Image: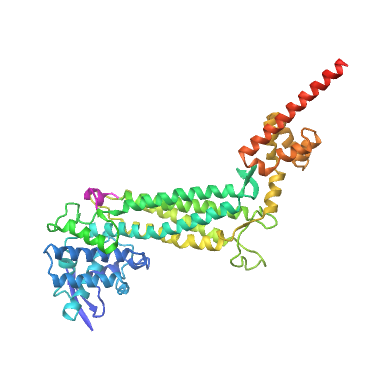
Amino acid sequence: MMRKESDVLGEMMLPDEAYYGIQTVRARDNFAVSGRTAVDVPHYLWSVAAIKQAAAKANCKIGALDEKLADAIVQASQEVMDHRFDDQFPIDIFQGGGGTSTNMNANEVIANRANEMITGQKGYDQVHPNTHVNMGQSTNDVIPAAMKMTCRLNLHQLIKEVAALEAMLEEKTQAFEHVVKLARTCLQDAVPITLGQQFSGYLHQVRRLHLALKTASEQTLDLPLGATAVGTGLSTHEGYLEQVYTELREITGEQFIAEDNFFDGLQNGDAYLEVAAQIKKLATFLSKMATDFRIQGSGPRAGFNELFIPAVQPGSSIMPGKINPVMPELINQIAYQVIGNDVSITMAVEGGELDLNVWEPVIIKALFESCTLLTNAIPLFVDKCLKDLQPNEAVCREYAEKSTALATVIATLFGYKVGSRIATTAFEQNLSVREVVLAEQLLTPAQADYLLDPMVMTDPKASAAAVKRYQQEVADSASASGLQKTIEETA
């Protein structure tokens, strides 16, 4: 069976089983570009429906909406929130009009379902999409309010995954504190550090990012709901603004409040920039860490071979036995996408003209794609890479002991010129710094043991104590030598 609907552009026949209406059909046909809809954005459609439910409750309590109609709208909105009508939202996430199509899609579905509850059939005889479901609202305040709500709800899960990442990095930092290795600057040999020290850098970065995400999340609690078309609140009834936020807080369990200035709320999107920036920072860090793992895990026979990256799948269709670092590579690619999304969000926020930013659909797509990608990728990376990541301790120590950078200690004791000569000799003759200083009798074997121990060099206090010990030995030796000379001269 078919039913007829009309709008200012004409009439259209719709399948009777469809809960959406004529405006949804027009938008579906106009914007069929990506195959992604509001349903594909976690919590977005839920947030729109929660706003409809809160508005119906508020309008009923202030006497602006009949109780029977309000009850039907509230129940229909709940069914949308419960995902019973996901197949009734076919409009592409990319759309002109600043989200009007998505807002009207929700209005039509809720209105048809509410009418069905009251009369037994779809249509708008009792509940109208604009008059009743959209009462006291505009697309211009509903969509940005739903976007901020969606930010808040999505960030909860991302923050949870970042906390798990932080915990795993703390575990690895402690587990690797005894593994001495060679640090590298400009991809060249530097002085020794421990693998635990390397991971402590990752850990502290994640702690900062964790806090920054929480701070950014707090900025999404201020909503422009109640601004209606341009910020004046035109078409709302007395008492609506206070009541709708009371209802919204009860529905969501979140402490959403009205923005201090609705004109600011509709014109500007800096809250999205802030959230996107923190997500980009997280992605950038993860990619950097993943690249470090790939470099240190390169080989196994012609690379660094310092890390054993867990093998999760075969790596080549032609080279037997080859294993690729696919989980770090996954993180790299996600970071590139997130960084690109951040650029899109920046351009969309900058592009807002005069009293409204209408580029919210692309912000929705880019921002929540980034959030979803990282929310999904972090636990995979933790479970399939970081958790079972292990050092090749023998190789790590060998690199540290053979490094010509150990001549830094010699420079501290004998001056830069001597240290440079020792390093050059060691490199040219393929010897260790220890072998060269012993050959030149700069140090005794015992002194070389404690001064050139790579693990000692990773601890500034231990290293300073070693230098002090050497200087004291030299002073004692000189004193003893002087005393012996005096005795001989006296005799």
Left or right, residue 412 beside residue 92: right
Magenta region includes residue 341 = no
Q: Residue at x 75, y 27 (%)?
A: 476
Q: Residue furthest top?
A: 490
Image height check: is 65 above or below 120? above
Task: Identify the residue at image location x=77%, y=38%.
Answer: 446
Residue extent of the magenta highlight: 258-268
Q: State which quarter of the image contains the N terminus.
A: bottom left
Residue 267 among those drawn in magenta: yes
Of residues 75 and 33, the one nearer the viewer is 75
Residue 301's place in the image compared with 10, above or below, is above
Instruction: Report whether residue 348 is seen.
Output: no
Locate residue 152, reporting x and y percent: 34, 57
Residue 455 spot, x, y in % from top left: 66, 44
Displayed quadrant of residue 226? bottom left
Query: In the rendered image, which quarter is residue 326 located in?
Result: bottom right
In the shown orientation, is residue 461 left or right of residue 148?
right
